[in-house]
Image (cartoon, rainbow, N blue to C red):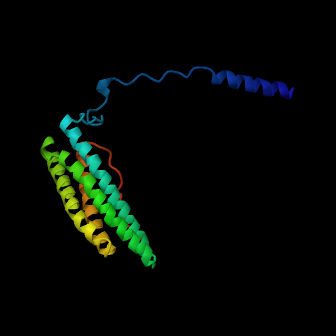
């Protein structure tokens, strides 16, 4: 008798699982939605704006290399191993040169004039920060091997200001905003 009851329960469960789901309720009338609450997607970028964003993507690869070099120098500071500190300094110097190449390749495509009004101002600030980083990478490449800690400190300051300007630009353009990639350390 119990087997028969279990069999009936399993059979009804399987039969209900095969039934189609009810259709979703009809959408509400268009005039019932407030205009303020509707999210309006940003317009698609123009070809010139797409070129700007492609240049930014290329330059961002260089920024990622700088951050990788900074992380390596930061990790070796906690150790008293001078060999690993020298290695991290040499690596930072090499990554500064490589980053300069990526940023230099992407920067010519970043022309702020393709945007209008306040977005143009934010794009101009972004390109100014990019130019500052590009100019500092030559100094970084020359001195990071001998003195990696001061170079890393200065580079961290410049990258934080770059990240802040990049965040403002991404908000203005309508791109998703990520968390800062150089988070502040909590102690």
Quadrant holding the C terminus:
bottom left
Can residue 8 be seen here? The reply is: yes
Depth order, front residue of 10/71: 71
**Residue 35 percent coordinates (x, y):** 26, 33
Vertical relation: 68 (above or below) 81: above
Query: Quadrant location of residue 30?
Result: top left
Quadrant holding the N terminus:
top right
Q: Is residue 113 left or right of residue 19?
A: left
**Residue 177 percent coordinates (x, y):** 32, 49
Can residue 46 be seen here? The reply is: no
Query: Quadrant location of residue 85?
Result: bottom left
Q: Is residue 23 left or right of residue 104?
A: right
Depth order, front residue of 186/123: 123
- What residue appears at the point 53 percent right and 21 percent down from the top-left corner? 22
Q: Residue furthest right?
A: 1
Query: Quadrant location of residue 13?
Result: top right
Vertical relation: 116 (above or below) 159: above
């Amino acid at each position: 008798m119990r087997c028969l009851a279990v069999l009936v329960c399993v059979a009804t469960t399987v039969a209900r699982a095969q039934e189609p789901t009810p259709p979703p309720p009809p959408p509400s009338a268009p005039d019932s939605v407030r205009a303020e609450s509707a999210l309006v997607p940003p317009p698609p970028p123009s070809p010139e704006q797409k070129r700007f964003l492609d240049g930014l993507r290329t330059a961002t690869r260089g920024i990622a290399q700088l951050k990788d070099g900074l992380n390596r120098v930061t990790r070796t500071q906690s150790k008293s191993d001078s060999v690993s500190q020298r290695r991290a300094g040499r690596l930072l110097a090499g990554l500064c040169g490589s980053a300069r190449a990526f940023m230099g390749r992407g920067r010519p495509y970043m022309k702020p004039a393709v945007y209008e009004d306040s977005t143009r101002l934010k794009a101009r600030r972004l390109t100014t920060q990019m130019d500052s980083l590009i100019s500092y990478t030559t100094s970084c490449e020359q001195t990071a091997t001998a003195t990696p800690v001061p170079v890393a400190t200065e580079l961290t300051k410049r990258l934080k200001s770059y990240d802040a300007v990049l965040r403002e630009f991404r908000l203005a353009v309508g791109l998703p905003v990520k968390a800062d990639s150089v988070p502040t350390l909590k102690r």
